[in-house]
Image (cartoon, grey):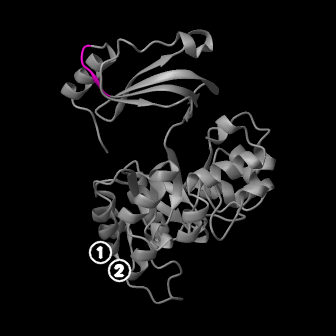
């Protein structure tokens, strides 16, 4: 995870104050502000990959917005178009795109996706830790953020499949120390979790003790079983298929990753059931599995956002 040094922070301060030029000035845009839910004329100054300053038009009047005194290495005229944050895919298996991490980035960045939280359990099932390590190495230095979660269930169903590896607590602990690893990927063995199996209990403990993020996978789990699962540590679920299920999980404080993949489309059931909620911060969007033909012709997270809007979600909230 990138952290700013004192020197970098001081330079950012100077750029914000106009004492050093921006690397990039983006002018003449309609800024979609996801903090306040507003859309208004603005200009944005970027330095060293960070937003240093946002200049909003007084009273929303773009004609009064002046950036004449801005100094920048590069100027970009937005021509009145909307400027939105980079889109984040909260749960995806890059292997399902049939592309390497680099080619996946090439395909989705043009659609506005700048961050993906990836679960390499498919390659992990085949090549074990070597496969997970490859996904990390192959995603370095790309024009997007690709963060990794350690596959929690390799194999998915012990004793019933032939896999290339078996991840136990010590394996998970090792991979959690790798760079750009945020936590534990979808915990599919929810029966093992709520029945306190040694395998899942120790894997969860290794993650939670390191303050790692624990991703859920608990389709149709409800009532006491859902409470038990949440008490064990998982925090969000992309395996939500019904509106009633989404409402229960959001009310329990669980995050719902509303999914629109190449295989499973859940937004039509989820969005109408939750769009009357008061802007819940624990609802987000993901693709899970997106095939290359769909990325090429429909898009990536931008397609999911469009689908959410079509189902009745407010556009700014969808973004």
Mark 2 falls on what kind of element? helix
User: Which residue is label 1 attached to?
Assistant: 130
Mark 1 vs mark 2, CA separation in Å: 6 Å
Numbered badge on residue 99: none
Q: Quick one: 82 or 105, which is closer to the camera?
A: 82
Comparing 178 with 189, the one in front is 178
Q: Is residue 261 left or right of residue 168?
A: right
Picture quarter containing residue 262? bottom right
Q: Quadrant of the N terminus?
A: top left
Look at the image and give the residue range highlighted in magenta. 19-23
Prevalent SS, magenta region: loop
* Residue at position x 56%, y 57% in the image: 300
Disc 1, SS: helix
Residue 109 inside the magenta-drawn segment: no
Q: Position of residue 217 (x, y in %)?
A: 59, 63
Q: Which residue lies at the image location 38% right of the left edge and 85% below the top edge?
A: 164
Mark number displayed over residue 127: 2
Rendered image quadrant of residue 25:
top left
* Residue 78 locus on image (x, y percent): 49, 31
Relative height, residue 196 to residue 209 (above, below)? below
- In the image shown, does 150 or 83 lie closer to the viewer? 83
Q: Are marks 1 and 2 in contact (CB under 8 Å)?
A: yes
- Which residue is painted at 47% across and 62% down in the image? 185
Q: How many marks?
A: 2
Q: Where is 171 relative to 214, above or below?
A: below
């Amino acid at each position: 995870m990138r952290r700013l040094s004192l020197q970098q922070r001081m330079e950012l301060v100077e750029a914000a104050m106009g004492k050093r030029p921006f690397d990039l000035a983006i002018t003449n845009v309609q800024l979609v502000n996801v903090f306040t839910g507003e859309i208004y004329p603005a200009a944005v100054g970027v330095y060293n990959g960070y937003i240093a300053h946002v200049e909003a038009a007084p009273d929303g009047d773009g004609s009064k917005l002046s950036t004449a005194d801005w100094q920048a290495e590069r100027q970009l005229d937005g021509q009145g178009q909307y400027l939105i944050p980079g889109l984040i895919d909260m749960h995806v298996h890059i292997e399902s795109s049939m592309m390497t991490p680099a080619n996946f980035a090439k395909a989705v960045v043009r659609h506005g996706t700048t961050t993906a939280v990836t679960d390499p359990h498919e390659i992990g099932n085949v090549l074990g830790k070597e496969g997970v390590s490859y996904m990390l190495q192959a995603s370095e230095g790309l024009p997007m953020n690709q963060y990794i979660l350690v596959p929690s269930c390799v194999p998915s169903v012990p004793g019933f499949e032939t896999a290339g590896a078996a991840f136990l607590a010590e394996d998970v602990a090792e991979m959690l120390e790798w760079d750009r690893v945020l936590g534990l990927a979808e915990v599919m063995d929810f029966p093992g979790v709520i029945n306190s199996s040694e395998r899942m209990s120790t894997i969860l403990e290794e993650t939670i003790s390191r303050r790692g993020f624990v991703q859920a996978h608990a389709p149709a789990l409800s009532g006491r079983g859902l409470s038990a699962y949440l008490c064990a540590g998982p925090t969000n679920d992309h395996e939500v298929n019904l509106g009633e299920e989404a409402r229960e999980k959001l009310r329990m404080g669980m995050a719902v990753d509303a999914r629109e993949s190449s295989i499973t489309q859940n937004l039509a059931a989820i969005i109408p059931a939750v769009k009357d909620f008061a802007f819940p911060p624990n609802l987000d969007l993901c693709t899970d599995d997106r095939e290359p033909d769909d990325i090429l012709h429909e898009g990536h997270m931008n397609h999911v956002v469009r689908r959410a809007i079509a189902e009745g979600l407010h556009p700014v909230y969808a973004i």
